[in-house]
Image (cartoon, rainbow, N blue to C red):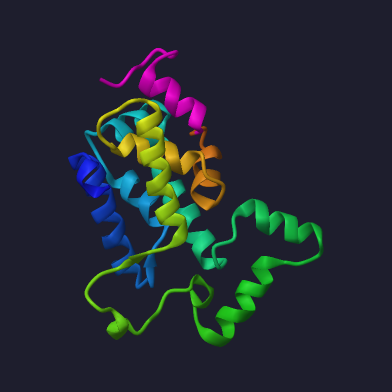
Amino acid sequence: MFERFTKDARAVVTGAVEHAERGGAQAVDAEHLLLALLDREGSRASFALAALGGGEWLESARTALGEARRRGGLSQAEAEALAGLGIDVGEIVARVEEVHGVGAMSGDRKDRRWWSGHRSFSRAAKDVLERALRIAVARRDRHIGDEHILLALTGRPGVPAEVLADRGVTYESVTRVLYGGGEAKAG
């Protein structure tokens, strides 16, 4: 499948691996794919994000991803649902970090010696890449671009989709910007 990826899509995947390595994560996750997309410039996905106000909210999106990771991968909606049941996720995180250190619930390993030369991809990250392939095939595109990865992230439940949706980036809005129906269209 990787041979069908455009240069920009390959850069997103390698960027996601770099984000995982810098964070000491055990595997590349969907959040790493989104972080790598947010780093890109001059690609179809970066055009779509910019057209949807990305310059104004890029840093807040990165912060929201970090906060979700700190909560053990819980989305804000999940944390709010637990709060409705009387469970204060913030308090739990604070107590765990008090005993085990900041970021203890993030799932990152501090001992990096376990790394065997390459990062594995989590089920969520694999799902995003498989969805990107399906989206490209459905659109009859010959290659998988970073725009397909962006669309796959918006169409899959989880933290990346929530972070993007909170900033007005949905499957529908990205499709409108990239393929028409709006004022801007990516070329």
- Give the number of callouts: 0
Q: Nearer the viewer, residue 130 or 169?
A: 130
- Viewer can see residue 57: no
Q: Nearer the viewer, residue 135 or 22?
A: 135
Q: Is residue 110 left or right of residue 93?
A: left
Residue lying farthest right?
85
Above or below 47: residue 64? below
Q: Is residue 94 left or right of residue 113?
A: right
Q: Which residues are magenta?
A: 170-187
Above or below 186: residue 168? below
Above or below 93: residue 36? above
Tell me which residue sits at (25%, 79%) in the image: 116
- Viewer can see residue 119: yes
Tell me which residue sits at (34%, 85%) in the image: 111
Tell me which residue sits at (22%, 74%) in the image: 117
Magenta segment includes 27: no
Corner quadrant of residue 151: top left
Above or below 93: residue 156? above
**Residue 5 locus on image (x, y percent):** 24, 42
Magenta segment includes 186: yes
Q: Is residue 164 left or right of residue 15?
A: right
**Residue 156 locus on image (x, y percent):** 52, 44
Tell me which residue sits at (40%, 22%) in the image: 177
Question: Which quadrant of the rendered structure holds the C terminus?
Answer: top left
**Residue 136 locus on image (x, y percent):** 35, 33
